[in-house]
Amino acid sequence: MNFSFSAARNSIPLLAVLISCLFSFYSIIANPVLNNDAYGYLRAAEIFNAEGIRPVLDHYGWYGYSILIALADRVLPGDLVASAHILNTLSYALLVFTFVKICAEYRPTRRVEFFAALTILSFPLLNEMRYFLIRDFAFWAFALLGFLLLLRYERDRKLLTALYSGLALLAAIVFRLEGLLLAVIVPFGLLVSSGSRTANFRLAGKLLLVLGLAFIVIFVLALLANVNLLNLIQYAYRFYLPLLFNLNELISSAALNLNQTLFTAENFPGNDNTGHGLVVLTFAYCYVVVANLIGALGMPFSVLLIYAYVRGYLVVPANLRWALGSYLTASVLALLCFVFIMHFLTQRYATLLCLLLLTLVPLALDNIYQHANTNETRRKFRNFFGFLCACLLIDSLLSFGYSKQYVEDASGWAVTELPVAATLRTNNFAVAYASKRIADFDKVPLGVQETLQLSHSADYLMLDIKRDDLEVKKHLDANSELQLIQSFANKRGDEVRVYLQR
């Protein structure tokens, strides 16, 4: 397997990586207020640096990402946030590079690489999350790296390539346990590869052997370190596993409730039959997954993929379809399981599936470009695609919403103006973290009422109140025990109010 990374051969992927890093730096500077999930990772990293790995595993679960942040903080300049941003930027870089190389596996031409770079760099769902601190970036990057190595494994059929692919999947699992589903399903996809049955069994056997030995080694090392991985997995999925093991009753109950909500005994005498509700429920959940996927992909890419499929431009090389199919199957199953268990879905959970589908876009664009009848048509195609990418980049990199600077201003006030001995209560993670006064800043209540219930006389309250929280504002204005000290707001009317509890 050739892992040559010469600048000439990889000029387009490396340029895409450079642009991706610039995009990340810009997004981080433009969005200083972190996502809410970030503070749990940062707190776990603080605990690791102060007390070691055991408290992190006992109270946070599968937080390899936080441990990596903590270790990076020991060698990188800046604080934990800076270390996390650097790690995320590098994860993005790996994701972008790997994405372009995957597309080149479908068709190894510079034009396909160029289309791939434009596709991944203009994908709004990823660009809008560049300033987030989440473990998903590394999970997506290593999952795609495992996919790339799997494609090369099918081509060169070497044990070493199988080892690299297995290690990439294991790295993905370190960040999100959903990688286990890939590790289970993907090797069996080799059985339907384009080779003979005997050759396919050998291919699958090698990869299963690599993964099996790797899991055994990891479990032995964990036991030697007095870490029970099975208990850790159960703790990490403590909200999901009880529902998963009780899935039959959960689905039956949901189907019956759906029946009774949609129908009455008068117009549908069989409304107590869970079978009817199950059909409707399954259709509804599949619809939710598809609708969520289209929303995550965005209308331009969704329309392009549908158009390319209808016109026959969406043709993956036959020897690579099994690998893509196995990854797509694992991703769809993960989404369906989640929506059946939790009854909700977010676009972020569909990102891996989106990335896999997006790898088909450059190939489709290249086919459309080649089928253009004249040079004039090709020029119009290039201009239109360039304009579309520019619109997507503007939409995903520039914020047209209301400023969160008021949260930054409030955080700065908490640092410089609060009395030294004062006790602070807040319902905003950013304020809690910046103040350095709340040890468990990731566990502050997000509700105003819950924060008020925790406060005592002489406490300072910094309450994040949204524009449409009219009842909350009315209640605060009528509370004679609260003295308004300061207020920070944006143009829409979102604000952080500072009160002194009398």
Image (tube, rainbow, N blue to C red):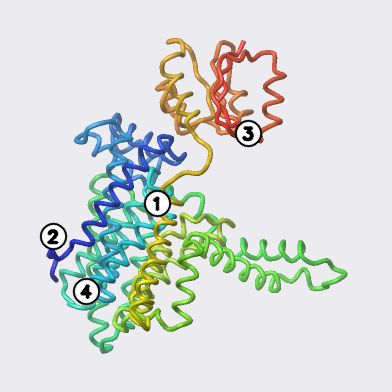
Q: Secondary structure at mark 1?
A: helix
- Residue 293 x %, y %: 50, 63
Q: Are marks 4 and 1 in contact (CB under 8 Å)?
A: no
Q: Which residue is mark 4?
A: 153
Q: Which residue is mark 1?
A: 127
Q: If you read the primary sequence from the N terminus, does the residue marked by circle 4 or circle 2 appear first?
A: 2
Q: Amino acid at mark 4?
A: Tyr
Q: Secondary structure at mark 2?
A: loop
Q: Which mark is residue 7?
A: 2
Q: Image quarter for residue 496?
A: top right
Above-or-below relation of 483 to 374: above
Q: Residue at x 13, y 69 (%)?
A: 2
Q: If you read the primary sequence from the N terminus, does the residue marked by circle 1 or circle 2 appear first?
A: 2
Q: If you read the primary sequence from the N terminus, does the residue marked by circle 4 or circle 1 appear first?
A: 1
Q: Amino acid at mark 1?
A: Asn
Cα separation between marks 3 and 4: 55 Å
- Screen quadrant of the C terminus: top right
Q: Nearer the viewer, mark 3 or mark 4?
A: 3
Q: Amino acid at mark 3?
A: Arg
Q: Which residue is mark 3?
A: 467
Q: If you read the primary sequence from the N terminus, does the residue marked by circle 3 or circle 4 appear first?
A: 4
Above-or-below relation of 437 to 297: above
Cα separation between marks 2 and 3: 51 Å
